[in-house]
Image: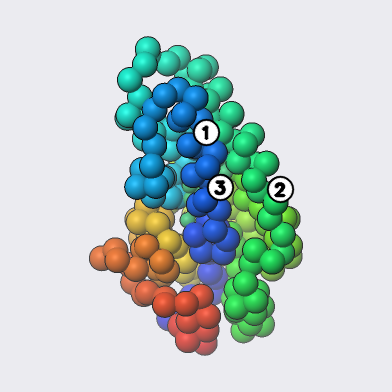
Amino acid sequence: MKKIKGIIFDLDGVIVFTDKFHYLAWKDMADSINTYFDETINNRLRGVSRMASLEIILEKYKGKPLSQEEKEALAEKKNTLYREYLKTMTPNDVTQEVRDTLTELRRRGYKLSIGSSSKNAKFILERVDLTSYFDAISDGTNITKSKPDPEVFLKGAEFLGLRPEECAVVEDAYAGIDAAKDGGMLGVAIGDATNYRRSDYCLTTFSDLLKLFK
Ligand code: B16
Ligand code: MG
């Protein structure tokens, strides 16, 4: 654990919980094209990019074939509604435990980055007043390949000026742990990802990070 100098955090499912907003916005979009969508399908969208999420939802679509333009319009429609929900977020949507843990990790000398598939990551961080807690932000706006590709975390490491093997990734999604491991980083799991065999360490609660990174 000594060589770890930077910690890269997934956003949705680790720092904030916007699953319910994703669900409501995708549900609205799916209803508009008479397509079945439920919470189980929503769980498969964790860490997956917007367009890849749409393709998963369209597995249940039975209408006429959709052009790329129509698909992009559907994704845009979902995102517009999703951002309306995001506007209801406030600093109270981040726990004191998360704030204190991030502050203490930084005090201990670790460099911190976000590593999120979301193109809305910076907007969310502003809403919950968390931008200043991080040294770098790698998100859906600076990548061409989504998790499980390691790109978002490799960029995060690069933004921190560190090598991949000097970084740990904190993730809630299997696709995120795959991305971390395939990128040569330590995979620290919380939530859903604690059931995944590729995870190196499992957290019961966010502040367990302070036991892991002394
Ligand atoms: P957007 P993360 C991911 O964020 C979400 O888990 C996933 O459900 C979403 O589809 C993806 O971001 C893209 O989000 O539509 O806002 O660009 O977990 O990687 O922080
Ligand atoms: Mg996540």
Name the residue tied to disc 1.
28
Could you say whether the residue bearing mark 2 is in a helix, strand or loop? loop
> Are the residues at dot 1 and dot 3 in contact (C-beta closer than 8 Å)?
no
The disc at residue 21 is 3
Q: Position of residue 128 (x, y in %)?
A: 70, 60
Real-space Cα separation, disc 2 to disc 3, in angstroms = 11 Å
Q: Give the amino acid type for the residue marked by disc 3 in the picture.
A: Phe
Q: Is residue 70 left or right of residue 178?
A: right
Cα distance, mark 2 to mark 1? 18 Å
Tell me the colour scheme of the image: rainbow
Q: How far apart are marks 1 and 3 (CA)?
A: 11 Å
Instruction: Say if residue 68 shows up in the picture.
Output: yes
Is residue 107 left or right of 46 when viewed as pictured? right
Residue under pointer 2:
87
Badge 2 density bin: few <14, some 14–19, many ≥20, Cα 10 Å: few
> Which residue sits at x=56%, y=22%?
73
Residue at image coords 45%, 50%: 47
